Amino acid sequence: MAMPEMEIIALSLRIAGLAILGALPVAFGFAWILARYNFPGKSLLQAVLTMPLVLPPVVTGYFLLVLFGTRGAIGSLLLQWFDFTFAFRWTGAALAAGVMALPLLIRPMRLAIENIDRGLEEAARTLGAGRIKAFMTVTLPLLIPGIIAGSVLGFAKALGEFGATITFVSNIPGETQTLSLAIYALMQTPSGDAAALKLILVSVVLSVLAVVLSEWLQRRLSGAGK
């Protein structure tokens, strides 16, 4: 495979990896809240967190541009205070991919939290374990399959993200041009079919592997909860 194609794949993997690393703690926090607490507006919060799955991706990208662009409500502050911007950078592509993957991270983790026998946590507390120790030794090990399943599925989503990314950070070769954006660009050129086909095959293989691994982990989690 030609060097530019390898660079596109490497950039896509780096963006998807950073997207999941950044989204994981946020997703876990929301999954914990939704699984463990009842409060007014819970259904609304769940609907808002699911919106990236049901909204057209370009709409999500537009909202990111309004919030994190150089003139956005948050982006202008980041630029002024830290001389940092997400706009037209690979970190912006990671932000867009992370937002789009967030619902797929939250659901498996929420199910994993709901499947935990609260009696195990209470038993650990009764035996003298504090909240943190009980979480680290009892709760977290039971959540690992759900966390991994959500992360793998979210990674696949981040790897194939297109609409929000191109709307927010454009299609810049070597900076924001991920697999899906590169395929789109190659399909617009008369001689790009062969290179596009290679990248399509890579995308299909990576996506299938991620989905199969995620499904296997979720089945294992369901079996462990019975």
Image (spheres, rainbow, N blue to C red):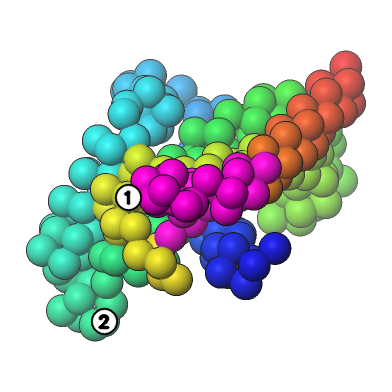
Q: What type of secondary structure mainly makes up the magenta span?
A: helix
100 relative position to 56: left or right: right
Residue shown at the point (65%, 31%) measured from the top left: 108
Residues rendered magenta in the picture: 177-201
Residue shown at the point (24%, 82%) measured from the top left: 83
Q: Nearer the viewer, residue 134 or 200?
A: 200
Quarter of the image holding residue 47? top left
Quarter of the image holding residue 175? bottom left
196 relative position to 203: left or right: left
On screen, residue 196 above or below 49: below
Q: Nearer the viewer, residue 214 or 163?
A: 163
Q: Residue 71, how many percent across, how many down?
A: 10, 63
Tag shown at residue 217: none
Q: Quadrant of the N terminus?
A: bottom right
Q: Which residue is mark 2?
A: 82
Q: Quadrant of the C terminus?
A: top right
Q: Nearer the viewer, mark 1 or mark 2?
A: 1
